[in-house]
Amino acid sequence: MLGFLKRPVVVTADINLNVVALTAVGLLSRLWQLAYPRAVVFDEVYYGQYISFYMKRIFFLDGSGPPFGHMLLALGGYLGGFDGNFLWNRIGAEYSSNVPVWSLRLLPALTGALSVPMAYQILLELGFSHCAAMGAALLMLIENALITQSRLMLLESVLIFFNLLAVLSYLKFSNSQKQRPFSLSWWFWLMLTGVACSCAVGVKYVGVFTYLLVLAVASVHAWHLIGDRTLSHVRVLCHLLARAAALLVVPALMYLLFFYVHLILVYRSGPHDQVMSSAFQASLEGGLARITQGQPLEVAYGSQVTLKNVFGKPVPCWLHSHQSTYPMIYENGRGSSHQQQVTCYPFKDVNNWWIVKDPGRHQLVVGSPPRPVRHGDVVQLVHGMTTRFLNTHDVAAPLSPHSQEVSCYVDYNISMPSQNLWRLDIVNRESDADVWKTILSEVRLVHVNTSVALKLSGAHLPDWGFRQLEVVGEKVSRGYHESMVWNVEEHRYGKSQEQKERELELHSPAQMDVSRNLSFMARFLELQWRMLTVKSDGSEHKYSSSPLDWVTLDTSIAYWLHPRTSAQIHLLGNVVIWASASLATVVYALLFLWYLLRRRRSIRDLPEDSWLRWVLAGALCAGGWAVNYLPFFMMEKTLFLYHYLPALTFQILLLPAVLQHISDHLCRHQDSLCGWSP
Amino acid sequence: MPPAVGEGSARSELRPRRGRCGHQVTRAVGPDVAAAAAARSPKRPARGSRRFEAAGRWALLALVTLLSFATRFHRLDEPPHICWDETHFGKMGSYYINRTFFFDVHPPLGKMLIGLAGYLSGYDGTFLFQKPGDKYEHHNYMGMRGFCAFLGSLLVPFAYLIVLELSKSLPAALLTAALLTFDTGCLTLSQYILLDPILMFFIMAAMLSMVKYNSCANRPFSAPWWFWLSLTGINLAGALGVKFVGLFIILQVGWNTISDLWHLLGDLSLSVVTVGKHLTARILCLIVLPLTLYTATYAVHFRVLNKSGPGDGFFSSAFQARLSGNNLHNASIPEHLAYGSVITVKNLRMAIGYLHSHRHLYPEGIGARQQQVTTYLHKDYNNLWIIKKHNTNADPLDPSFPVEFVRHGDIIRLEHKETSRNLHSHYHEAPLTRKHYQVTGYGINGTGDSNDFWRIEVVNRRFGNRIRVLRSRIRLIHLVTGCVLGSSGKVLPKWGWEQLEVTCTPYLKETLNSIWNVEDHINPKLPNISLDVLQPSFPEILLESHMVMIRGNNGLKPKDNEFTSKPWHWPINYQGLRFSGINDTDFRVYLLGNPVVWWLNLLSIALYLLLGSIIAVAVQRGARLPAEVEGLSQVLLQGGGQLLLGWMLHYFPFFLMGRILYFHHYFPAMLFSSMLTGILWDTLLRLCAWSLASSSLARGVYVVGLLSLLLGTAYSFYLFHPLAYGMVGPLAQDPRSPMAGLKWLESWDF
């Protein structure tokens, strides 16, 4: 206390001029003429549209990665005062004056520049010399593929930055573990590891591979810690808990945080709404919420409803019927019931309205007080415009002959009675007495006579069905599938007794006022699930390549071409660096195997500490290359050269490490051999 | 009584898993005599009791085998109609008997064995195996079913022996045998003409021989050592030869071999030469031998199937020339392409077909309104094209012109023979693949424009620059736009007669879609040669059939809106597979695991992981375990570890597979899981008993625990046996049904 009175306050600053210089050169190489070209370059066309969505606060769904990366880019747009008004439709289009190109490209450029000094630091922390560390940094600095990728509004350099940050902070942490565990810097680096990992995953899903690598190294270290008998049980437990908190809990929370911010930012409805569930759409401003606002919550006998399929694939659609009947004989010669078609229709339409009817009564209006429909109740569904009953029977469906046909019953006076009783099965209920709720309840309609459930088969009907989607009855016992589940989207209490009045009523929009909110976790889970399952069109691309092409640099991407001057930007690696880095990986693998086998025979070529250093360098650098590269062989999406860059950075780190090792041990080893020879 | 026998065996058979490691593992024996055993000298028991004990062990093995055979062969002939996939594998067995060529996504060994069994038992291959439910009538199907049931019955004694070898504990082995004998799923799967019993037989046989050879490790290069090692290799070849999932047991054996070699390498008492010998022995027996056998099965396969059959179309033209009955067989056509030749051009990708055109135009609004060009799977006059020089329209077949061969890099024109229009492409988008260019037939009587010029390139220029029928892989590059002729494989709508779309792709990537070969070739000016010269060599056939199988496997993709079986359904026995019958009047067989067994397995895996990690952490922390616990934990970690690895290897890869999956894919993993259960509960009960002070109480706990497990499985089998042996009568909802009250899960469908 008051120590500063006795001793002077001294600030000693260790400034490594190498780092400063590297940072400066890195910044120079990445930031110089950043705003050139003032045109959309390659994938900027893709990320740009999401930035515009952020600027306009419009909800979107992008399956390519979690929202953190997009948000970082949008931050650049926000700082530059971008209003989001730009049509991102064509590579090479000139940016209009309202687009702050420099600030949009700033963040990727900064992260790309900072990766250079970080490479230096990582090699130092791995225990290699300043010379090797400088080498690694210089290689990072001059690798033209990295420069190209950093200078544009793309996410790879951000991902690489967080990957390196995760590795660097883990190394700092594990080095301070030897000296002062539980010190402030120990905690700082441990936490930073977790944060960097989650940021890497948040930028792109492939960041998860680096995260897993760090986790693996950390768990091996933790296992050694458990084996350390000089530590007390409690202390070991504390160590393990601290690691679990920082490397498992913190990343999970951070990941949730990204989505939380994302959902706060994009709160307006937009063009991607349709893919989401009704409940999610209702939680956005505008769009469905405007329609469903004020609907009565509980579905009652006499309610008029539209039923949306929960699975919504191949397209989101509503249960639908219309005057046309199934053709008597299909093209393939099978017969049908010739009754009124029931389909699923992907557009809002007055024919999507159905009335929930109590089989015991005749009226089609809601009584007062309304009698809510509960789980397990038997109901009839009456098509609003044609007043025919939803019906199914043992007739093969038009396109899925193993399922039953669903129709609206027409009495032809033949021996085919109507079978129009449906039991309501609320899938996401909490108790058996739960009430059928608008939007929130996901229900199956199970046919009483034949125990089939109403299902969207996914097939498009031919011309006689107006290319709408086929609806069939599928045996409940085949198993649960989301395509059997429906939810009420629009809903109102029917008031008109007469058919004419009712038709008028159906045409008028539903209104009344209540709004409802979905919890964050529910929205997060739905959004994440849809993002993971959204189908990319899997289209081939002129510049797509296979992972094997990357190592040999057998591919390149033309990013941008000036229409008149033919000035261009081309993504292409430096052949010398790529070849030598690959060579270094091979040399590392061979040497490692050699040492390992000889150690097994108790021949120690390396002193213990340099062996450990050699292993750790390999685990992080060669391992980092492997985990960021090999999984691409199993991926089915369209791949490009830039997917290889994260792997390449790890390979570049390995190169000087291998060189130093060779010069330190193998060359000296030969000298000593010579020295001993008689 | 099991524990007593177990105690005896444990003492006499007590041997560490690796003899050379030196340190003796003291196996905790029956708790009742644990103390006594410790006090007694470890000398061998008297000879008489030893012989008696050996006889007892043989008797037990015989009993287990007998019970297994009895359950598997009981009512094997029912139902006398085709059940489930019998329609495929029975049919394929018939193909072998009839020697007609067919295509299947699985390697041939399993179906060959089925065919052999049918042949030996007097089945003549005349039954059509059209669809499930067809009656066999007078056809002899029992030979094939009996063969599968025989292999399926052997699984139980194999599991018994594996567990015995790993744990040295008879009760554990007995428990495993009981679990498998009384599992309705294994039973059902073993009773029909399927690949699964054959596959599981080879997997278990490989595992057994591997375990046996591990225990011979203290006598390397002895006769039994060689025997078990090479037997492992033979069984690996068998497993891979039946289905590609046999790869998983290869991985398991591979892992075991590597860790084995690692230990040998670390043993400094062995010279490097000895280690080298070990390595060579394993390479010989576990790599060379299986590969040879595996290749041999294909040699037999191709030798046997020499008649044209339903599988021809899946293979390349050159391949088809081998099959008698195929129109390419024994055909003789000119070898090299010359100008004026009339040819058919076939796409190299499976099931795309021949380049085709016909007198129909592309409809309004779809590219230019010119004549359609498609690919068509069947042979037809409209598949014929004439190859012409690009710059002259003179008839090259005029005898006054010399023969000029087409060479790599030549610029040619392809004229459709029936309609005299040229193959043409231009900057219009293709009908379905919007990023490609449209391909049409253009021009009148062969006179078109420069968009009809194509450069012909040979991809595999091993045969020189000329273009060889069947063997040369060619690409056609459009001269003006630089795009490559290909087929997208998409089906055109009705206006295109549901033939496949042909496009010109601007992406110059090498895919099979854009590579073609010449099949038919007519040129009166050239001498015909026999196609036998062009027949592919055996390695080429082998490679091609593997490519076709892999593509076939990848083609089995599930549809979005279908209910499909997911890997996580399997261990919880979520849903079975209907083998036969739907309604209450049908004879119904339903493939479903015995839920008691399966849920016990599931619980055991969780318990194993818990117990295993507790022990591992305790050891790592340097805790001193009592000798008995030490022995038990050795068995648990090493023996159990191998089985857990087997379970994981046979289960987790399915999560990564994109193809459509079925419940029965889990059964190999289930075998491993049941063996793990046997070891786990035996160890757990011994640990419980050991922790109790009084020896009589301990013995009681052990015996009661084990008996209740055995009897519980037996009783559950009694409850669920109608699933496997078949049932007629009302469905489970009805109280009169034999399965009344047993539909424990909604999703079970019986």
Image: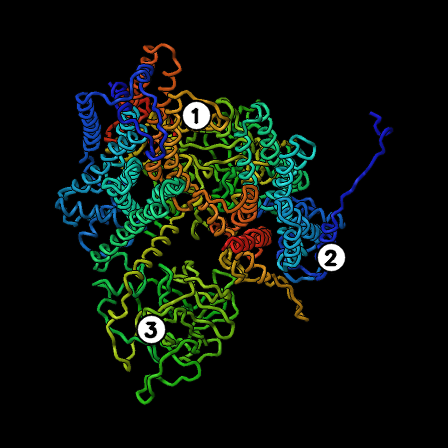
Write the residue at 32% across / 72% down: B469
Residue contact at pointers 1 and 3, CB within 8 angstroms: no
Disc 2: host chain: A
SS for tag 1?
A: helix
**Badge 3 density bin: few <14, some 14–19, many ≥20, Cα 10 Å:** many
Residue B714's spot in the image, x, y percent? 27, 23
Residue contact at pointers 3 and 2, CB within 8 angstroms: no
| Viewer-nearest residue: B637 or B121 | B637
How many numbered marks have been drawn onto this rendered protein structure?
3
Residue where numbered disc 3 is placed:
B468
User: Which disc is residue A28 wearing?
Assistant: 2
SS for tag 3?
A: loop
Name the kind of residue labelled 2 in the image.
Leu
Name the kind of residue labelled 1 in the image.
Leu
Residue A347's spot in the image, x, y percent? 54, 46
**Badge 1 density bin: few <14, some 14–19, many ≥20, Cα 10 Å:** some
In the figure, B440 relative to B252: above or below? below
Q: Is residue B504 left or right of residue B300?
A: right
Name the kind of residue labelled 3 in the image.
Arg
Residue contact at pointers 2 and 1, CB within 8 angstroms: no
Residue positioned most to the right: A5
In the figure, A300 relative to A539: above or below? above
Distance between the alpha carbons at the discs numbered 2 and 1: 58 Å
* Quadrant (top left/top right/bottom left/bottom right) for the C terminus of chain B: top left
| Viewer-nearest residue: A30 or A458 | A30
Disc 1: host chain: B
Distance between the alpha carbons at the discs numbered 3 and 2: 59 Å
**Residue A376: quadrant of the picture:** top left
Residue B615's spot in the image, x, y percent? 45, 26
Distance between the alpha carbons at the discs numbered 1 and 3: 66 Å
